[in-house]
Image: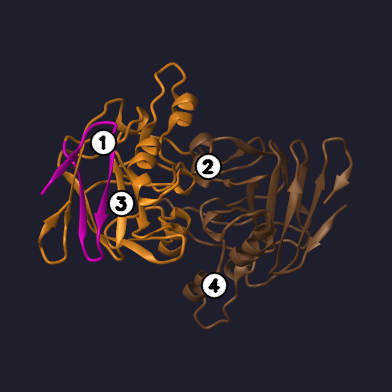
Chain colours: A brown, B orange
Amino acid sequence: MIRRIPPRSGIAVSVPRGAVLTVIDPEGGQVSDMFAVAAGDPAEVLSNGRTLDYEETLRLTTGARLWSNRSRVMLTITEDTAPHHDFLLTPCSEDTFRHFYPDKPVHRGCFGNLAEALAPHGVVPAMIGTAFNIFMNVPVAPDGRLAVLPPGTRPGDLIRLRAEMDLIVGLTACSAYASNGGSFKPIDFSVMLAEGAATG
Amino acid sequence: MIRRIPPRSGIAVSVPRGAVLTVIDPEGGQVSDMFAVAAGDPAEVLSNGRTLDYEETLRLTTGARLWSNRSRVMLTITEDTAPHHDFLLTPCSEDTFRHFYPDKPVHRGCFGNLAEALAPHGVVPAMIGTAFNIFMNVPVAPDGRLAVLPPGTRPGDLIRLRAEMDLIVGLTACSAYASNGGSFKPIDFSVMLAEGAATG
């Protein structure tokens, strides 16, 4: 079953070990911030630093693993049709709206959406670090400068990630202007259990 | 007063707002992992994701600010003679020793050293994310691949950081082989109060 995340919102979903989470950009050009915690232990969280350390690349695509702050593999990317993802930048938040868009209304952003969705699972905001920013386009210039460009995804582009441990996954349809080329669109996802039965 | 951190060890030091922390590579080719928390609130910690977001570059040098997970500026780099620093990779740890050096003795690494030094200040290990890896040489290839090369620092190279809030700073002389070109050397540091009086 494919579920839809409305624009500028977020959800949390249980993804048991062996299940495959599919995240789809239904219209193209939309980012989804993903943050994962170990089910039953919200102090074990997704870590960009551990992941970059062990995977030895910024270019995380099919075959790459996403690691926790305790050096355990949380997810493996099993399929990826998108041109890029980002694992450098934190979720947009009230603070980033004030910083980058001082003339626009403040929005709680992906950070606020993840914090609300993950709170019932015991996750405190201070533990929400850098999300894996699915479909986000953050090129690194030769001199190290970072840019945030519209995603190059086409409608239907997707990424599949297999859970390597029991997880609670927070997932958003991103709320920031720059990430999405100035528009806000939905994100679709599904969770397929190892046995082939859909859940969500 | 200049203090010395012996090879493969770490310390924690109070750095009040306005004070300048100087970190020196006395022999050249040595990395120092730095992690900062707000004095009195160990849930506010240094954030590589927030820093990369707001500074918009991987190349953090004079003028750059290091930000907390609550989007407040913790430190400003006021002087920098070193060719590079890294803010992508997590501190070396027992796990990274097992992963990267399976035939060498396991060491608790910078992570263990930071955890011990910061524990008296209320910092739990799960809150120690990516450190600012002073003098570390992590080039990013055009295809996104990361390498860990020996630091290009010469004896006496240094970085100065001004505290923009009251901080507890954890600082190490790094324990990993690759970061330091296979050798382990000390790190020197000083804390100069705003008034000009030295402390430590």
Q: Secondary structure at mark 4?
A: helix
Tell me where residue A91 sits by quadrant: bottom right
Compute the Cα span from label 3 to label 1: 19 Å
Q: What's the magenta region?
A: B1-26
Residue beneath the point at 46% across and 31% down: B96
Label 4 marks which chain's residue?
A
Q: Secondary structure at mark 3?
A: strand
Compute the Cα span from label 4 to label 1: 39 Å
Which residue was labeled with disc 1? B30
Q: Amino acid at mark 3?
A: Val
3 and 1 marks on the same chain: yes
**Residue reaching furthest top?**
B103
Q: Does the image show residue A176?
A: no
Which residue was labeled with disc 4? A94
Q: Amino acid at mark 1?
A: Gln
4 and 3 marks on the same chain: no
Which residue was labeled with disc 2? A69
Q: Amino acid at mark 4?
A: Glu
Q: Are marks 3 and 1 in contact (CB under 8 Å)?
A: no
Q: Which comes sooner in the sequence, label 2 or label 4?
A: 2
Q: Nearer the viewer, residue B185 or B118?
A: B118
Q: Is residue B177 left or right of residue A38?
A: left
Q: Nearer the viewer, mark 3 or mark 1?
A: 3
Check residue A169 in the rendering and tell me which mark sits there, or answer none. Answer: none
Q: Secondary structure at mark 2?
A: loop
Which residue was labeled with disc 3? B169
* A167 in the magenta segment: no
4 and 1 marks on the same chain: no
